[in-house]
Image (spheres, rainbow, N blue to C red):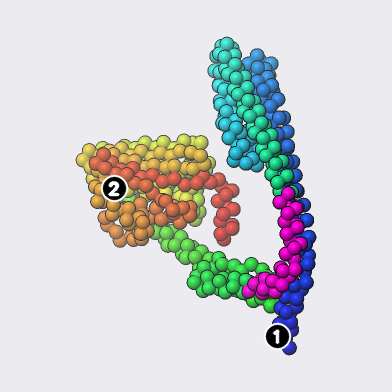
């Protein structure tokens, strides 16, 4: 009985669609209304854009040059004049209008936006001249440039308004043509209404067949492994529940796959933490021997310095189990390590650390730099006759932290560099490797895994030495805790 009821539902749908065909006669009217509304909206938007640009002209030609004059003449300070606020408002308004303008009228606004940058540069020069207490006559010359650039921007805005007016005229012609075509279509639809009615049954059949075909296509894609495939909701009652169940199945399969991937990443992180915790005992033995030797020699200050450096080294290495530490701590970590190593290799090792204090507040994954420094010592400086220099540098550019560890050691041959890059690409470090590069492979894996980025370390090496660089996003403490709470 249920099946018969569903079959009637489909037949009833066909019957309803057949009778509703009569309403197609109102389609031309709706099309006419929509057509006129669309063009009315275009007209309205064009007028708004022209009004907005017109309001900017006074700001560009009068307010900004006037504020610049008040600053140069000493009547106002930069904060009092709010000149940068005015420039920013103009830039933002031009950008907003540019995005809503068609490509044919956009060029004038694009050039105007770039010219506003020139205007900003001249205002910056006035500010710098005032800060440097240069003669007022120089600022008066810059003020002349400000007025000229403002006039140029005003000219470009006028060009844009003229282009919008021409576009509005073209829209008017298109509107008249559209009204004529719509009237013709109305007449044709009235004539064809009876013939279309006879074809409505076939069209209704297709409206039912298409959801079934979409269902079959989506099911085939899911079976092939494309778990992002989803089926759009259908108005056919008989297919609605089936569609919902197939989508639910795909959602659950995708959730299971995502969970499996996340678990695999967590496992890799745990493995890397284990590798990271394996501190080289020889380093500890040699450092303690050096402390004892310095103590026996009565070098009290050297003993204090070595002991403090060793304490800082292990305290930051452990970091109470934290994976992320401030750059200032990472810097202190490698300083302690290099001080210890310089005691052992005093005659052959020199180092420089160029990491500005301004970036010390940002957080990075701990123990990224120390393995690179260690690699530079043992595989570059130590094995080169006469030793060399290690330079560690860091900087912030456009929200990205860029670090470099460069040495003047023995360097690598092209074949050695190729093999090292292959090992890093495979990402399979093992503690039993004795041919060097374990620290580099491990750091490369940690950068790619924790920062979820494709590139890790970039290595350049020749007979004059080796440089290892990497870049990671700049992150603050709150971002670290938020990400950990979400992933946890």
Who comes first in sequence, dot 2 or dot 1? 1
For the N terminus, the image quarter is: bottom right
Image mark count: 2
Q: Nearer the viewer, mark 2 or mark 1?
A: 1
Query: Would you say residue 96 is visible in this rendering?
Result: no
In the picture of the structure, the residue carrying the numbered disc 2 is 378
Asked whether the beta carbons under mark 2 and mark 1 sit within 8 Å of each other, the answer is: no
What residue is at 33 percent from the left and 42 percent from the top? 467
Q: Secondary structure at mark 2?
A: helix
The numbered mark at residue 3 is 1
For residue 375, above or below residue 11: above
Give percent across and percent down for residue 403.
42, 42
Mark 2 is surrounded, within 10 Å at the Cα level, by few (under 14), some (14 to 19) or many (20 or more) other residues, namely few
Magenta stretch bounds: 180-209
Q: Quadrant of residue 103?
A: top right
In the image, residue 365 above or below residue 94:
below
Q: Is residue 31 left or right of residue 386?
A: right
Q: Is residue 205 magenta?
A: yes
| The one of 142 and 357 positioned closer to us in this rendering | 142
Rendering coords of residue 324 (x, y %): 50, 51
> In the picture, residue 5 is in which quadrant?
bottom right
Q: Position of residue 274 (x, y in %)?
A: 42, 60
């Amino acid at each position: 009985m249920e099946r018969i009821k569903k079959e009637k539902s489909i037949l009833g749908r066909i019957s309803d669609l057949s009778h509703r065909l009569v309403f197609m006669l109102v389609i031309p009217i709706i099309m006419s209304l929509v057509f006129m509304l669309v063009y009315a909206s275009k007209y309205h938007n064009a007028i708004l854009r022209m009004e907005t640009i017109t309001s900017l002209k006074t700001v560009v030609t009068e307010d900004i040059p006037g504020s610049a004059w008040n600053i140069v003449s000493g009547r106002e300070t930069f904060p009092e004049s709010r000149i940068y606020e005015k420039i920013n408002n103009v830039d933002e308004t031009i950008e907003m209008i540019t995005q809503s303008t068609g490509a044919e009228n956009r060029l004038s606004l694009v050039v105007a936006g770039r010219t506003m940058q020139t205007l900003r540069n001249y205002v910056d020069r006035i500010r710098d001249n005032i800060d440097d207490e240069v003669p007022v006559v120089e600022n008066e010359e810059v003020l002349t440039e400000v007025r000229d650039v403002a006039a140029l921007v005003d000219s470009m805005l006028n060009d844009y308004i003229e282009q919008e007016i021409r576009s509005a005229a073209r829209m008017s012609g298109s509107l008249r043509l559209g009204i004529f075509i719509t009237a013709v279509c109305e007449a044709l639809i009235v004539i064809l209404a009876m013939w279309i009615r006879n074809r409505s049954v076939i069209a209704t059949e297709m409206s039912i067949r298409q959801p079934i075909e979409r269902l079959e296509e989506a099911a085939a894609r899911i079976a092939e492994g494309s778990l992002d495939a989803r089926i759009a909701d259908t108005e056919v009652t008989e297919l609605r529940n089936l569609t919902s169940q197939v989508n639910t199945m795909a959602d659950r399969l995708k959730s299971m796959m995502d969970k499996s991937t996340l678990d695999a990443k967590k496992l890799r992180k745990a493995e890397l933490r284990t590798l990271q915790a394996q501190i080289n005992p020889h380093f500890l033995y040699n450092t303690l021997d050096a402390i004892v030797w310095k103590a026996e020699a009565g070098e009290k200050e050297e003993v204090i310095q070595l002991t403090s450096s060793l304490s800082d080294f292990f305290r930051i290495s452990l970091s109470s189990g934290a994976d992320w530490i401030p750059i200032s701590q990472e810097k202190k970590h490698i300083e302690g390590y290099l001080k210890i190593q310089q005691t052992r290799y005093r005659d052959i090792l020199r180092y420089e650390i160029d990491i500005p204090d301004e970036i010390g507040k940002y957080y990075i994954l701990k123990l990224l730099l120390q393995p690179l420094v260690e690699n530079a010592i043992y595989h570059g400086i130590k094995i080169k006759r006469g030793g060399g220099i290690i330079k560690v540098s860091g900087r912030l550019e456009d929200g990205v932290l860029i670090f470099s560890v460069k040495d003047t050691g023995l360097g690598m041959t092209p074949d050695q560099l190729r093999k090292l890059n292959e090992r890093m690409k495979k990402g399979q470090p093992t503690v039993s490797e004795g041919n060097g590069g374990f620290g580099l492979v491990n750091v490369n894996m940690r950068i790619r895994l924790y920062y979820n980025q494709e590139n890790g370390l970039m290595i350049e090496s020749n007979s004059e030495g080796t440089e290892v660089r990497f870049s990671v996003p700049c992150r603050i403490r709150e971002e670290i805790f938020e990400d950990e709470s979400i992933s946890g």
